[in-house]
Image (spheres, rainbow, N blue to C red):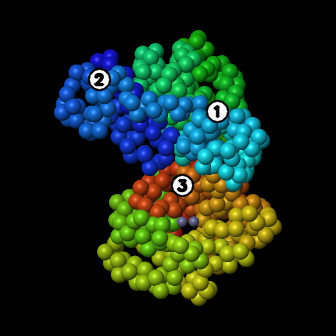
Amino acid sequence: MATDNHRVARLLYELGALSERLYDRSRRFRANAYRRAADAVANHADDVLLMTVEELTALPGVGSGTAARIDEIRRTGTIARLEELRALDPYGAEELLRVPGLGPRTVARLRDALDVRDVAGLRAALDAQRVRTVRGLGPATEQRLRAALRDLDLDAEADDTSLPIVDAVGHATRLTRLVRRLDGVVSVSWAGDLGRTSDTVGTIDLVAAASEPARVLRAATAMPAVRDGADVAESAVTLHSFEGPGVRLTVVPPGRLGPALIHATGSPGHWRQLARLAAARSLRLAPDGLHGVDGDLIATPDADAVYRALDLQPVPAEQRDGTDEVALAREGRLPLCAAVGDLRGDLHDHTDWSGDGRMTLRQLLDAAVERGWAYVAVTDHAEDLRINGLDRDAMRRQRDEIRSLRAAYDGLAVLHGAELNIGADGTVDYDPDFVAGYDWTVASVHSLFDLAVPTQTARVVAAIRNPAVHAIGHLTGRRIGRRPGIQLDVDAVLDACAETGTALEVNCHLDRLDAPADILRAAAGRGVVVVISTDAHRLGDLDNHRWGVRLARRGRVPREQVANTWPVERFLEWTRSS
Ligand SMILES: [Zn+2]
Ligand SMILES: [Zn+2]
């Protein structure tokens, strides 16, 4: 391996990461191009600094722009643009960039004019009313920033330095790909918050299996995405990436993977209960493996093997929360939850008939066939949603088009539906006769998020009691890390669902994961019917069932209670009767 290649790869990776971090997401494409190029360079056998620009562009993933950057590194030892970005002090500015409404440009201005370098400095400058003296900023900016800092304080009280899972997953996916490619790595799994599919992620916990862990740990600190590695221990290392939260990488030999995964996924309470059960069987459960009476290692290549060795039903990662799951597993009473392969359809999908949908009706139906679904519901926005909603005429025309398409999609039941808007008083769009014409309806809250609990609850319960409503979409309306959910009397809402048979949706969007796990758990206990829906607006969203399935597992929803696991006849009969 040419040693210069690592240095070059790192510079390219950092350039991509910083331009995305310091500017906006529109740079993501270019950032990804740099990441890909970094990868190609790191894995290339010959020294890239000895190659011509023409030879460089022949490498997969290296375009002419990147080749020019590499040439620049050859001539000057660095990349001028990267030095500019570094001068913005991206790592020091991190704290300031987390203040809502504070972008890199303003951060740079505040630093240059007032020497503001962190949130404390910003607070002092606001108190002294000095922010308004900076060109381009004024008293209105001061007011806005003060409000933003107050919000930030509230977040801090909630002890949250963690990232919404939707953001963490992007980082984790890239890192997983890099680790998987290291020499000798057999597998890489997500543990910790990601393994449990928590709403937010503090540390990205990865657990890899490899026969020579020490070698992999050393190689990992040299990955292009990594700024530096710290706390290198026998089987784990903390990595600071150029982007995203900290990373904890644990590497163990394949036969010890089970305990390492369970230990890294937590919770501490769950681990303690398992260790106690092991001790009662004269076994010793440690992060480095399960040991027998004589100290010999009992091979446990996955988590399930550990549970089996302890005479337990396997506890899925999403349920390892240290409550009563171990007790239930001892009695074999953990519910059987749905897997992605159990889902036979999707019941909340937008097409380009809605202003915000990005796939055509045919594309949606083709994708449904490709996935082997037996049914799919087209649920474009209804008219009360001003920008994206469809009026009656458009809905009638869509219904006709679906009718004419059905002949071409013979193994697929295509339901014409709508995503109705729950109004202030709980009524929905159109009039009851028109709404009764749909095969399937999802009703959701898209407005008035701040109503008092009794009013909000009455509003949602009225929608649940509406005989034309089949399911309640994204119950709380939360956007993780951006908008809290509406406040509801959850018991009253779930009782109404149980009583009327109206289903509760598990919305698969990673920034929603709505209804939240604790509500799902309560719903499961009451026998409420659940649907796991992607709420797809584009084709790629149709793969999001995997997230909803994990959320439903966190909520311990039994598969039997998930309506879109049912065979088509049963499902259709249910939609007609409920
Ligand atoms: Zn919606
Ligand atoms: Zn929707």
Label 3 beta carbon within 8 A of ligand 2: no
**Which circle's residue, 3 or 1, is located before the other in the chain?**
1
Q: Is residue 308 visible?
A: no
Q: Is residue 539 visible?
A: yes
Which mark is in front, 3 or 2? Answer: 2
Residue behind mark 3: 509
- In percent of width and height, residue 56 lies at 23, 31
Find residue 75 and name its label. 2
- In percent of width and height, residue 28 lies at 43, 45
Quadrant containing the C terminus in the rendered view: bottom right
**In the foreground, 117 or 493:** 117
Residue behind mark 1: 115
Give SS at disc 3.
Answer: loop
**Which circle's residue, 1 or 2, is located before the other in the chain?**
2
Contact check, label 3 and label 1, Cβ < 8 Å: no
Which mark is in front, 1 or 2? Answer: 1
The amino acid pointed to by label 3 is: His
Quadrant containing the N terminus in the rendered view: top left
Which mark is in front, 3 or 1? Answer: 1
- In percent of width and height, residue 42 lies at 33, 26
Give the number of marks: 3
Q: Is residue 165 above or below residue 566?
A: above
Q: Is residue 516 above or below residue 528?
A: above
